[in-house]
Amino acid sequence: MTEAAFLGLLAVAGGLFAIGLAGLVLRRTVLFQLLALEVMLSGPALAFVAAGARHGAAEGQAMTLLVIALAAAEVALGLALFLRLRRGEVGTDADAAATLRH
Amino acid sequence: MDWLLPALPVPTLVAFAVLAVAPVPLSPRTTHRIAIAASATTVLAVLPFALACLLHGRCTVGPLAVTSTPEIGAIDHALGVVLDPLGLVTAATVALVSLMVVSFATAFMRGEGTADQRRFFALMALFETAMLTLVIAADAVVLFLGWELVGLCSFFLIAYDTRSAASLAAGRKAFVMTRIADAALFAGLALLFVDNDTIQLAAMTESVETSPDARDKAALALILVGALGKSAQVPLQTWLPDAMAGPVPVSALLHSATMVAAGVFLLARFAPVMEAVPAIGYATTGLGLATALLGGVAALAQNDIKRLLAYSTVSQIGYMVMAVGVGAVGAAMAHFAMHAAFKALLFLSAGLLSEAAGHSRELADLRGSRRRAPGAFWAFAAGAVSLAGLPFLSAGWFSKEAILAALWGAGAFGPMLWTGAVLGAGLTAGYARRPLIALARAPLGHAGEGRGPSASDHSLGAEMAIPLAVLSAMALAGGLGVEALARFVAGGETGGHAGAETLLLAGGIAAAVLGAALAVLLAARARTFAGSRAAAVMRGGLGIDALYRRRVVAPASAGIAAIADDPAARGFVAAVAAPVGPVATLAANDPLGRRLDASRSAMSPARRALGDRAERAFAALARLVARLARRSRRLLTGRARDYAVAAALGAALLLGLATGMAWN
């Protein structure tokens, strides 16, 4: 892998992370925030793959698998919370759910 | 017993610390007790040294180093104390006179406010501490420390009455005039230090004695200027007559044992070099004689009794300086001790007399004092007789004769000096007799009216009567000890003046008698004399003060005014002075004294000491914590988005830091 390709992949990874962060900070709906979190997580995962390929090491891919597992677990938890919120009085507005209690 | 020597100034220093800074209210009675206890302890502390000297012949203690001394090259910089015969006589006089004056003051200052009395006695204690420090100093640093403290205390005490512009001005004048002298003294001591690589006074004088060079002479001249300024000698004498603006006990102490005596003591310390460097000896003697005559002439025409006494101090110190100049340290210190006794007596009794005469110090208003306040009158008479040098019956006669004899025997100029000094003695007898004549006379028609009999009811308590009695006894009978004292200080030598005893005796007696006659003559022609131009010139100290005012003070003031008118300078001054204002206001409000004066509720000692300040401070702390908590709670919005922003910013910050650190 060339230096330029590596840097390009890192830039894409950074961009994904930034887009995810922006989505997390700017959207108020819990569902969209969960989606944004997924996008954020994909950025570092891509960076791990790129770095693993750059140095010819297996750890990069291993870390990516770990990140995907983490993301799955997080989505499961997040969706459970989302459903719980939707059924309550607060609704899906993240800002309204500021007290962690009813 | 040696350990006691460095502790000599400690009792009064402790008294000063307690009176000045202890944050507990003290009643005037407690204040008085502390002040008297400190002074009495000091007298008791001097006693063992005097006894060791009298009984065992062990008259020199030390020098003792009071600091450990890591070597700095070849420089000897150990701070130390020493008590030799010169120091012993001075310290004993200082301790005794201070005790008398403080005891008198406890009764005399009773009418003042509680805080004012505390301030007064604190400063008096510090005054004594400073003088004792100066006296027992074995090195230039401790000496200068005591010297400056004496000057500072006298400034505060002269300006004690902070509501009176005159006393503030007098304090400032004394401070500035003696500051000129102090700068010279500092330069002189520094020069000697640089030349000799030692701060020990003994080593300095020894080195100058063995091989005086031009620099040593310059240093000695500077030290002489320092001594002249402190002792109010020509040409720096103008501050002392104004210094009588201070309270009566301050004048009594300042004129006798502490402030003005410091210069004489310094010269006596450096006396061995007077012979090695004759020019300095001549200058000292000449200026001393000039001062003695000028003081005498000026005192003769004064109508204010305190001013008269002030000029008499100037002239009497002149005698001591003269004696040191011709090497007669013993005679000088004997006169110092006698003078301290009778001058303190004169000031204290004059204070009582003027109080009895409705707080007037004019001789004309003081007429009739003999009936109004007989106790104070006879005390004053004892002092005046001693000052005048009444032959054979007063201490002043013997000590003055010792000085005159020493002057007669002082080389080729001796008889000339003697003649001048006898003339001065005649003036002394004259100006000492003059107030006595006035006091004994019946009051003028208008002067006694309106004063009422209340003033005559004034009876002396023990606090006043005992000091007056003791000082009177010293002023009259102290003469018996003069010769022994002089020989003791001089180290066994008698003032060798072979022959001419009869002439000396006759001259002294004639001076005393003719001087007294002069006073009678002046009293008889009081009306024409008082109005004459000559009297006015004499009263003004021969115009020297006016000359300084015209030639030095006025141009300097004009220059400062010119600078002050400059806008740039004004802006600068304003900028510099801006932070001073609040501090000055705080100091002027005297928060400590105010708090001490505040009512004392019957509470626990802690509550009484601190008021409810502790409680309020604690409540303020609680309020502060609550406010900080409210502030910090605003960070915790509970909104996930805000936390995400904070986390992102934190991560970015860490990333930036890591990048920055990995850069190099």
Image: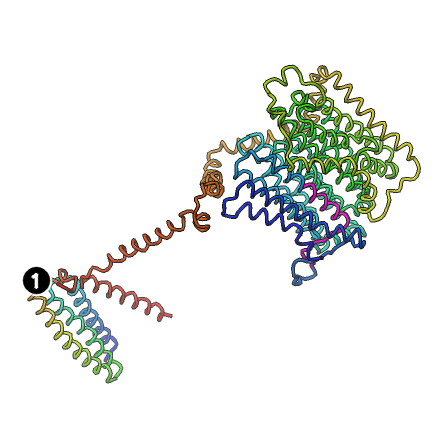
Residue B88 is covered by the magenta coloring: yes
Q: Residue at x 63, y 18 (%)?
A: B447
Q: Residue at x 86, y 39 (%)?
A: B410
Q: Is residue B123 shown to the viewer in this render? A: yes
Q: Which image quadrant is residue B464 in? A: top right
Q: Position of residue B234 (x, y in %)?
A: 72, 34
Residue B540 is covered by the magenta coloring: no
Q: Amino acid at mark 1?
A: Glu
User: Between residues B504 and A93, which one lies in front from this camera angle?
Assistant: B504
Q: Which residues are magenta?
A: B75-98
Q: Residue at x 50, y 44 (%)?
A: B25
Quarter of the figure that contains the N terminus of chain B: bottom right
The chain holding disc 1 is: A
Secondary-structure class at tag 1: loop
Which residue was labeled with disc 1?
A89
Q: How is the image coloured?
A: rainbow
In the picture, measured across the screen, residue B575 lies left or right of residue B89, that is left
Q: Position of residue B363 (x, y in %)?
A: 67, 22
In the picture, measured across the screen, residue B529 lies left or right of residue B456, that is right
Q: Is residue B45 above or below residue B398?
A: below
Q: Which image quadrant is residue B343 in? A: top right
Q: Position of residue B77 (x, y in %)?
A: 67, 57
Q: Is residue B283 shown to the viewer in this render? A: no
User: Between residues B414 and B158, which one lies in front from this camera angle?
Assistant: B158
User: Between residues B19 and B156, which one lies in front from this camera angle?
Assistant: B19
Quarter of the figure that contains the C terminus of chain B: bottom left
